[in-house]
Image (spheres, rainbow, N blue to C red):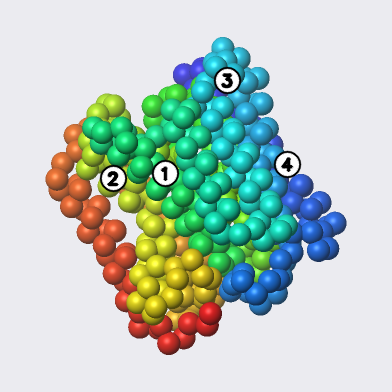
Amino acid sequence: MELDLKIFLICSGFFAAMGGFSFLLNSILLKFARTLGIRDKGDIVRWASTSKPALGGITFYIVFLISFIFHGLFFPSSDILHNVAALGLLGTGSLAFLMGLADDAYNTRPFLKFLVQVGCALMMISTGTLIDIFDTAWMNQLLTVTWVVGIMNSINMLDNMDGISTITSLFIFLIGVIFISLHQDYSRPEFFILLGLMASLSAFLFFNWSPSRMYMGDTGSQFLGLILAFVGIHYFWNSSLINDMSSPGQQVSILAIGFLLPLVDTTIVSINRLLRGQSPFIGGKDHTTHNLGYLGLSDSQVALAFTAISAFNALICFFMFRFVEAWTTSLTLFCVLYCLTIFVVLFLLCYRQRSLYKD
């Protein structure tokens, strides 16, 4: 009991400190930013018509580094320098941050971004972070590369309206924290990393909520996409129930629930653009968020809708992690039906309003 109270106080204090620090740093960046991080080029398509500083990712990365240091101070026995997976996360997170920073500054070529994303995936694999669902090693490695590259691009594509990527990332990180807490594995470096990033995202949401004053930019979306891919591998793809039992059906089902919104949005946009004979990688105002806007919802209402769905998804994952001891076919069927319902509703909405798209 005393240990639980101590952990609670430490985590609460750390969350509050990182939230306050992020709020202060974002305020400073916003105050002194004039053109730094502001992009207004023809190949960048945003819902808002005005350019704003895209500096939020800088705060995310600083908090990420502080979280590593904080973990080392409170859990010196864990010896993070010998934790290969954690060092891999530090390296890949830094690489994703630098690539996003370069893209915000110089508008790098898509192929170069793709190569860096593949490099991040390969670095993860080499440091022991990979999906473990197949019996064949090369299939797990190929799926891991596809997953990392896909999520990094998915979060980047989802960053098309105020607050959306922020909210989506926040709730996925929350699911990761729930998983670690239920297994009482607080000494893992990822626990404080996720906690710190949740605090940073919460503070950033103050500036990113409609009408936003700041964007996270590619610096933020690429970095968050990499961290989300890492979280997805450890706490979704390779997840287990409360009794440490796991099965492919359970792993894929929980993954689909937790990452439902970015996966659905990317899939719908890709399908509709291919049907129109367009490249899925060219920007446009045809995302699920945009279509909710065409339906008459305000930007804030769209963000609230995504918040409600994300919160419900987190609740489902908590229930499965905490109370399910044996995975059944009926649970898989429930997850499939739920995900298909969300997908079909949003797909039909986007398809019916395709004439309103403005590329």
- The count of marks equals 4
Tell which residue pokes out farthest to the top in this image. 77
Contact, CB < 8 Å: mark 4 with mark 3? no
In the image, taking residue 250 as reference, residue 200 lies left or right, namely right
- Residue depicted at 60% across the width and 24% down the height: 71
* Earlier sequence position, callout 1 versus callout 2: 1
Residue type at numbered disc 4: Phe
Q: CA distance from mark 1 to mark 3?
A: 25 Å
Q: Position of residue 45 (x, y in %)?
A: 59, 72
In the image, taking residue 133 as reference, residue 89 lies left or right, namely right
Q: Secondary structure at mark 1?
A: helix
In the image, taking residue 57 as reference, residue 35 lies left or right, namely right
* Earlier sequence position, callout 1 versus callout 3: 3
35 to 117, vertically: above or below: below
Q: Position of residue 356 (x, y in %)?
A: 46, 86
Q: Secondary structure at mark 2?
A: helix
Q: Position of residue 334 (x, y in %)?
A: 21, 53
Give the number of the mark in front: 4 or 3: 3
Q: Secondary structure at mark 3?
A: helix
Can you identify the residue that label 3 sits on? 80
* Earlier sequence position, callout 3 versus callout 2: 3
* Mark 2 Cα-neighbour bin, 10 Å: few <14, some 14–19, many ≥20: some
- Residue depicted at 64% across the width and 58% down the height: 108
Q: Position of residue 16 (x, y in %)?
A: 65, 38
Q: CA distance from mark 4 to mark 1?
A: 34 Å
Can you identify the residue that label 4 sits on? 21
Q: CA distance from mark 1 to mark 2?
A: 17 Å
Can you identify the residue that label 2 sits on? 252
* Earlier sequence position, callout 4 versus callout 3: 4
Residue 76: image quadrant is top right
Residue 145 disc label: 1
